Amino acid sequence: MVTILSVIQIVISVILVIAILLQSQAAGLGGAFGGSDGDSSFHTRRGFEKILFRGTIVLGVLFAIVSFLIFYLS
């Protein structure tokens, strides 16, 4: 059972990393260091950006749940 959960955790972690990298492409480098990249700091997420944002949250929660299950079962 722990082996199956470990494989699931690896798959979730790879997808989570990809989702995070896709989100960071939208942000400019100036915003990362506190500067302004010509865009306002707050904007409404729409379309794919909103789906990606919510999916990243779900993947993070699933990763945490699987991690706790592996810890509990081993």
Image: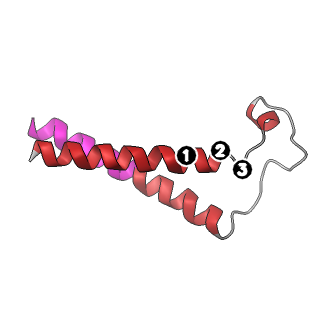
Q: Which of marks 3 and 1 is nearer the N terminus?
A: 1
Considering every residue shown, the one lying at the far bottom of the view is: 47
Tags 2 and 1 touching, CB below 8 Å: yes
Look at the numbered disc 3 and give the secondary structure of its residue. Answer: loop
Q: Circle 3 is placed at which residue position?
A: 26
Distance from disc 3 to disc 1, alpha carbons, whole Å, reads 11 Å
Q: Residue at x 85, y 50 (%)?
A: 40
Q: Which colour scheme is used?
A: secondary structure
> What span is in magenta?
60-74
Look at the numbered disc 2 and give the secondary structure of its residue. Answer: helix
Q: Circle 1 is placed at which residue position?
A: 20
Q: Circle 2 is placed at which residue position?
A: 24
On screen, residue 19 versus residue 64, left or right, reads right
> In the image, is residue 73 part of the stretch drawn in magenta?
yes
- Rate crowding at label 2 as few (under 14), some (14 to 19) or many (20 or more) other CA atoms within 10 Å: few
Q: Identify residue type, mark 2.
A: Ser
